[in-house]
Amino acid sequence: MLNRRQFLRRTTGSMLATGLFTHPFLSLAQSYDMIVRGGRVIDPSLHFDDISDVAIAGGRIAEVANNLAAGAAQEIDAAGKLVMPGLLDVHAHYAQDAQGPHICLSDGVTGWVDAGSAGADQIDEVVAIARSAPQPARVLINIGRQGVIPAGDTADLALADVEAAKAAIARNRDYVVGVKARLTAGVTADDVEVLRRAQEAASYFNLPVMIHMGQSATPMGELVAQLKPGDIVTHMFAPPPNAIVDGDGRIFPEILEARRRGIWFDVANGRVDHISWDNFDTVMAAGFWPDTISTDGFSNSRSAPGVIDFPNIMSKFLNFSDMSLSDVVACGTGNASRLFSFLGDKGTLNVGAPADIAILELREGSFEFLDNYEGVRMGGQRLFPFETILAGRRVPRA
Ligand SMILES: [Zn+2]
């Protein structure tokens, strides 16, 4: 046991030796709540990619530096792992049951948006789940008042009820952060009219609209003309009819123009009709990379071999596109933080940011990756969840 004088002599000596004595935030007996040691820290928001320690105090990032001399109440050995901002899933369905938020959290997801599971008729139930989620979570309201239904959300146009949506948003103004419109033929009787109604409800509250694209009756060029800056096109790799790319592999000019206007393009991998390897290759070869990567996942996604978890979807881009690891991480963190204001201070490991951290493992080997059409590809690397930290606390594996 050291007495205080011996302790100070030792601490001061080691601090002087490492030059840390001059650090403005360090006092003599500096001790953090937690230090994540020795991982490869990747934070595209700071253009940072290096072996480093991440120190946490008071639920926030306190310092990112190599070989921190300070101690901590709890230390996590991240040697050989990737340490990045917590993943943000902007298109998921985790508000459908109480388990969803916990399962995705242990996969590294520290913020999510339920994208239109519910319409006006059930919005209070999904908002209650989002409200009780361990991590920050919000919902998009489906313009179809009964939400996602087998007969088609707005196959009966009367279900696209603007007044019902507005009343539901007004009741839940703090948790409804946008309006979702599913525009596939069969799901809707009239995609142009349903999108018009979604915009009417959203614009009243100055909220974005997210359109679910793919197999629509109306060409994408016409649909995106109805979008405003800040709106989101999800399922961007959905194959024809009415993909974002023409038969010669060229992105439609209206789509390029939409991106220039500030409309976001999101992945939303999902299970059915949202991504085919052929169309994935065509869109990526045209250089039209996603703004955000998302899962379109549910609480049971681990048993859906094409989805599994957020790191699995990220791995598809690592293996089968020209995107770098840093590009892929940006799509799941910093980029996603810009879509919704409640995520605005997340997606970064900047000092002072909430200490929401995903620690992943990048394994080399032979891994299967599925599209939505039973297309199987083998890839040489895959990201696996290892540990999640939320607001400075270690999350138990669910
Ligand atoms: Zn979805």
Image: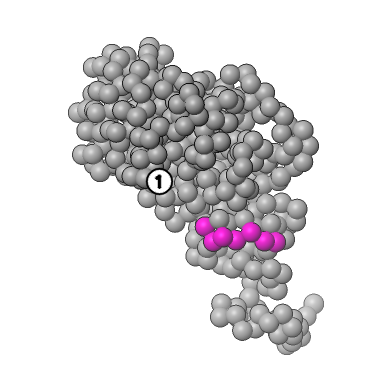
Inspect this view and state whether residue 71 appears: no
Residue 355 is left or right of residue 13, and the answer is: left
Residue 29 is at least partly visible in this image: yes
Q: In this rendering, is residue 225 above or below 329?
A: above
Q: Residue at x 67, y 47 (%)?
A: 360
The single residue placed furthest to the front in the displayed view is 248
Magenta stretch holds residue 160: no
Q: Depth check: 213 or 385 in front? A: 213
Residue at image coords 53%, 45%: 332
| Left or right of 309 on screen, residue 268 | left
Q: Quadrant of the N terminus?
A: bottom right
In percent of width and height, residue 191 lies at 31, 21
Q: Nearer the viewer, residue 324 or 183?
A: 324
Left or right: 247 in relation to 8: left
* Disc 1, SS: loop
Which quadrant, please, contains the C terminus? top right
Q: Locate residue 89, reporting x and y percent.
A: 50, 40
The spot of residue 134 in percent (x, y) is 50, 44
Q: Residues within 10 Å of mark 1 (few under 14, many from 20)?
A: some
Q: Is residue 50 magenta?
A: yes
User: What is the image's colouring?
Assistant: one colour
* Residue at 31% across, 28% down: 222
Residue under label 1, please give it: 339
Q: Amino acid at mark 1?
A: Leu
Q: Which residue is more in the foreground, 332 or 112? A: 332
Q: Is residue 38 above or below residue 340?
A: below
Residue 349 percent location from the top left of the image: 55, 59
- Picture quadrant of residue 378: top right
**Residue 113 higher or lower than 324, as above or below:** above
Residue pictured at 37% horizontal, 50% vertical: 341
Region rendered in magenta: 45-51
Residue toward you, 393 or 238:
238
